[in-house]
Image (cartoon, rainbow, N blue to C red):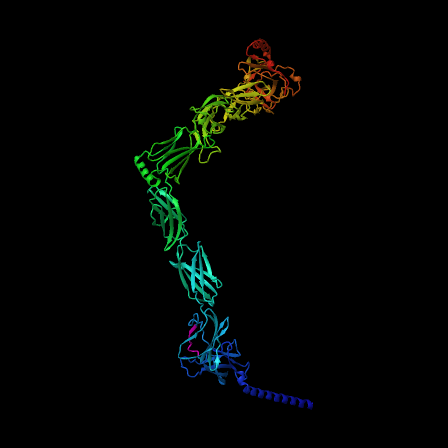
Amino acid sequence: MIRWKYGLHYLIWLLLVLHLSTCQSDSLTTSAEQHELFAIKKDSLSPWSQILVSLPRRHPLYQSFAAKIQDVTENISDDIRDSNKTFVSSDDSPFNIRIHALRPGHRYSIAIHGQKDASTSLIKEESVVMDPRAPDFRSTDSDIQVAEHNITMRTIKNDSYLQDSFSIEYRQINPDKKFPVLQILDIPEQKNLEFYLGNLNSGFDYSVRVIAHKDGMSSRPWISTLTTKPSPIKTVNINQNSGSCVEVTWQTDEFSGADFYTIQYALQSNPSNSTNMTIPSTESSISICDSMLQGEAYQIVATVQKGGQVSEPLVTKFQLRPLPPIDFRVRADLKRGKYKMLAELPTSSKIDKCQITVAGDDVERSINYANIEQTKSGHRICWFNFALSPGERFDFSISSMSDESTSQKLQKSIVLTPAFDFNAFGLTLQESNGGIELIWPKSEVFMSRVKDIWNKVVGADSLLNMRITPIGNNDETDKTLKYETSPKNLDPVFAKNLVKGACYRVQLFTVTKTGIISETRHNETIRMSSPAVNVSLESVTRSSATLRIVFATHHDSTSISNCQMHIVVRDMNGKSVFDKRMQLSSSFAPLLNLDGLRPFHKYTVNTQIICGGGGHETPQCPAATRTMRQLSFSTRQDKPAAVQNLKVEPLNSYSVMLTWLPPALPNGILTHYNVNVTKVGSDEIRTIDVGVSSNRSDHTVQVVIDELFGGHTYNFSVRAVTEAGFGETSPVIPSVSMPLMAPPKPIAAPVIMKESIGSHSMIVRFPTTIFDNRNGEIKQFAIIVSETTADESINRWLETDNGTYTWQQVQRFDVWPSYVAKLQDIQKVKQDADVSIFEEIGEDETCREARADRICNGPLRSASKYRVRIRLFTSPTLFTDSPPSQVMTTEEKFFSLLLSVTRIIIIPSLLHSPAFFSPRESVLSLTPF
């Protein structure tokens, strides 16, 4: 326990000793290394304007530091002395203080102060001289002037910069050549700096270094590569070749130092609008083509370029020759009575005027000038007039001129041809009386003018020649007719007996007495007129016609050449039905047959006589065509074709609507239509005539056919009729089955004959007119008997439309309903108002023994009232009832004997009456349906 206590005291004492030792050591270190901890150094990047003060990371005595700066430079004015400044550390750089914006070459006193709480103490103070700074000759206030053999560098000194002297080092680059270093003392009072580098070679690069010195310190050098101006081009030679190119050559010094040459050329009148060309330094010539206008004055500026330096320009002026005239020709000017030289000039050249030189054997050499004119078509010309004689030889030289430069075009020994102008001389060339005639003008005033022109530009002794040459396959193509005339003889020149329709080439020209022919000639081809023919109608039928063709006048076979007759026959619709060409001869008079014509059609005959147009003639000689008077004729009428679109439509059971269109080929004037109506299964044919008029825009003909019978089938055919006869029947004959309907309701009612009324029977009479077969043939008729009450009403108990009660079935009724007393078949009844049918009712006494459903004509009740109807049948289900008869009452029984006697007397008399018709005579079959 005692040992542990002593050990603890010993440990505490040891730690205390160690702590005191450490504190004493730190205090000694701070005093000894104080200078090193606050080191003051110029910034390596900007040693002329910035200083860095190093600070410790941790200091036991101070919390912050500050650097105070004072400019202590000697022998300077207060204007350039820097002001006092204080700098502290920044958050971005807490371990140093950056002192900036100092002035190059100035001496500064730097004091480092430490701060803790409110107390401040000086830690360190030191004096520092800033590095000098070399001048910048690339600044805005600087200037570098480069010549061929020297370089001058100028700048304005910064008053705040201090230095003792400057040194300039420079050397030539490639090939390398060193120069002595220039040492220049600084004069503070001098505001401008100017350094001159001489004895340099032209066109070379030089490396230049400028350094400022202060108190043994040197600034960072200002370094630049400067190039001296290259030597200018000595001479420039310009040669214009025969084409449109200009060859430019030049000479330079052997050591010009050129990188390349620049050639700049422009018009002297507009030097600002120039064209620049760059040429490698290895070349000494260049060709300029198509960009210079010949005849213009140009200037060329040639320079040598080395890097960014350009030599002094060499300006050379020159004039390009204009292009020579393209061509020129000499023609007679009939208006002026002189010869006119017309020169065409190129548009791609500047030409101010033209010069013409004319020389001849008998003419003195003359020189004339003319201005340039522009034609409407854009050509440039110049022209001259000369009073020269035709037929003589001359030398012509024409030059295009631009300033003092000329280009010449020469033609020697040119013979002037005599003038000729067909229109100016007023000549007329025409076909006349089977020949060709050349006529001079009739006006004396005009001919006086022609004679004057003739003497000046044609020649007083010159003649006008006319040559006529046949063209084509004529046998006389090798025979040329030649004629001569002049204004001295004004008689017409006539070439006679030429071939009709032949083609001739007529050539007119003038000839001098020496045989010189005019360059201008009048060439014309004349086709002699075609012969005329008469076309007449010889005969005409329904489908053919014959034409007779004869010549209008007589011609020999040799007087017609290569002529054809073209006949075209067209119908009324303009369609060609005949088109033929036939060769003409003097004996041509054919009868032309036209077959296959359509009846009752109008045709026109167009005839043309065409001469020429063959392969042996030139296109300049067109064919001659004579059109004859048009001939028209019409063919005779024929039977018409079938009608079109024939249709039939039933209107009711006895009428149809028949429609059709007129025939496409009426072949004449339609008079009417013939309609045939045929009942199928019968020989009965009905013919109806229908008019041709139609009030419809589509010309459809409509007709209603009546008096047909229902249940029958009918065929219909229609034929158009002209004065030539009946036309064709339509290829499709329509048929129609008439609908079967109930018979028409009769108007007449049956009549009960009072004389025949007994106690159990009576006789009913009805006319045959009720058998109307329009809705179908009536096959049966039935007699319907109805008992009436006192008020003449009918018992309709269980009555049906068909009335199927029989006499036996109505016996159970107090008042008999309607029943069928008789049902008879009929085949044919003549409908006549004067013919009647008589039927007895109640004649069969055996009906009580018959079956109940058997139709039986049993006896009537005595003293009972009855009505009678006639039911007509076209089929078992189609029937119509006649109106009922008047009400009649049967007799009492005690009158039966008297009635029988009366009947015996009346019936024989009725049987001999002419109005009696027995149904037994018309019944073919009594078998019910």
Q: Quadrant of residue 744?
A: top right
Q: Nearer the viewer, residue 921 or 486?
A: 486
Determine whether 912 is above or below 254 in the image.
Answer: above
Please state the horizontal and vertical placement of residue 444, each as a whole percent of the image. Answer: 30, 35
Q: Decide if residue 758 is on the left or right side of residue 267.
A: right
Q: Decide if residue 407 is on the left or right side of residue 40.
A: left
Q: Is residue 378 visible?
A: no
Inspect the magenta stretch and tell me whether residue 411 lies in it: no
Q: State the extent of the magenta-drawn residues as a range.
A: 151-161
Total number of numbered labels? 0
Determine whether 301 is above or below 710 in the image.
Answer: below
Q: Quadrant of residue 750?
A: top right
Please state the horizontal and vertical placement of residue 382, each as a whole percent of the image. Answer: 36, 48
Q: Quadrant of the N terminus?
A: bottom right
Q: Quadrant of residue 455?
A: top left
Q: Residue furthest front?
A: 361
Please state the horizontal and vertical placement of residue 83, each as a whole percent of the image. Answer: 43, 80
Q: Nearer the viewer, residue 555 or 211?
A: 555
Please state the horizontal and vertical placement of residue 3, each as a whole percent of the image. Answer: 69, 90
Determine whether 138 is above or below 269 in the image.
Answer: below
Q: Is residue 889 visible?
A: yes
Inspect the magenta stretch and tell me whether residue 155 lies in it: yes
Q: Nearer the viewer, residue 545 or 670?
A: 545
Q: Decide if residue 657 is on the left or right side of residue 197.
A: right
Q: Quadrant of the C terminus?
A: top right
Determine whether 903 is above or below 785 in the image.
Answer: above
